[in-house]
Amino acid sequence: MNRRAMVTGATRGIGRATAVALAESGWDVAITGRTARAGEGRDDSDTGEGRSIPGSLEETASAVRATGRRTLELTADLHDHSALQRAVDRAVDEWGGVDLLVNNAVDTGPGSMVPILELTVAQLESKLDANVVAPLVLIKAVLPGMVARGAGIIVNVTSHTATGDPPGPIGQGGWGVGYAASKAAFHRFAPLLAVELGDQGIRAYNLDPGYVETERQLVNAAALGLVGHYRGAPPSVPAAAIAWIGDLPDELENGQTVRGQKVALTHGLHPDWRAPR
């Protein structure tokens, strides 16, 4: 298999860490995201209040190039399906194809942490469009080339919210149904891809990252006085697991859900991050 990857949502967090981890493993990495330049990132989430957040495509691209691998900076919004198709088309035009697709990006706008009685239909539709339809657009864009070559890997960064029940309502350890419902639908892609196209060389996996302390969450925690209240893994942990999947696809059951933090510890992919601070 050639080593040409595409990672969505690569401006920061798990996406950025994954792009770097794949580059360090010998992959050329095309990266997508909304924030093109440093300093442009803003938190549009329910509690973000438009706060500035670090991360950009140019910074991730610089980190990828520092490993000696190629990269493409592809500005694209999940709600702009044409832009997503153009991103894949450019990777195909310049590199000849995409061999590994990492669907990491999610809709970060309002509606993820909203109770059912307050959730609007428009918010739910936005979550479904970005978290379910957009990944399908990307999958369908890369699949013809993968099938023609007889090999391809798709990793979908899913969430515990897709399959687990919250321990309490929002504000007490819970999450909103808008986000959970969209991730639940997204969670079904990998096993069905494995069933339908596994015999044509397509391997697909869900990657459950567990709780991860991304830049967005750290900025919000500081603003809300919650620093140290919740403890998560750094983004480099699920990134290491994704790079491992890219290197050892034949050792995994096609279509399965990989627990990123468990895999990182079991296989020694990352230093133990759980030591007391």
Image (cartoon, helix red, strand yellow):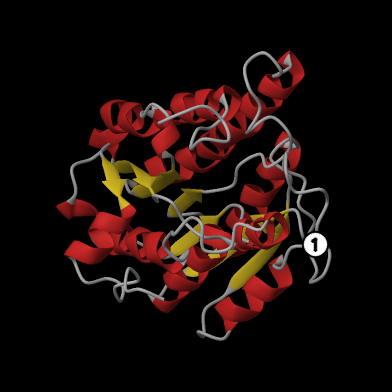
Occupied quadrant, residue 224: bottom right
The residue carrying mark 1 is: 52
Give the amino acid type for the residue marked by disc 1 in the picture.
Answer: Ser
In the displayed structure, 109 sits above or below 96; it is: above
In the displayed structure, 245 sits above or below 274; it is: above
Q: Is residue 54 left or right of residue 88?
A: right
Q: Residues within 10 Å of mark 1 (few under 14, many from 20)?
A: some
Q: Position of residue 19 (x, y in %)?
A: 52, 66
Foreground residue, 143 or 59? 59
Instruction: Locate the N terminus by quadrant.
Output: bottom left
Tell me the residue at 36%/29% (across/down).
164
Q: Position of residue 210 (x, y in %)?
A: 39, 49
In the displayed structure, 25 sits above or below 139; it is: below
**Mark 1 element type:** loop
> Residue 74, can we see it?
yes
The total of numbered circles placed on residues is 1
Q: Position of residue 200 (x, y in %)?
A: 28, 37
Foreground residue, 256 or 1? 256
Instruction: Locate the C terminus by quadrant.
Output: bottom left
In the displayed structure, 91 sits above or below 48; it is: below
Q: Position of residue 148 (x, y in %)?
A: 40, 43
Occupied quadrant, residue 27: bottom left
Foreground residue, 29 or 170? 170
> Residue 96, can we see it?
no
Q: Is residue 106 left or right of residue 55?
A: left
Tell me the residue at 45%/26% (across/down).
184
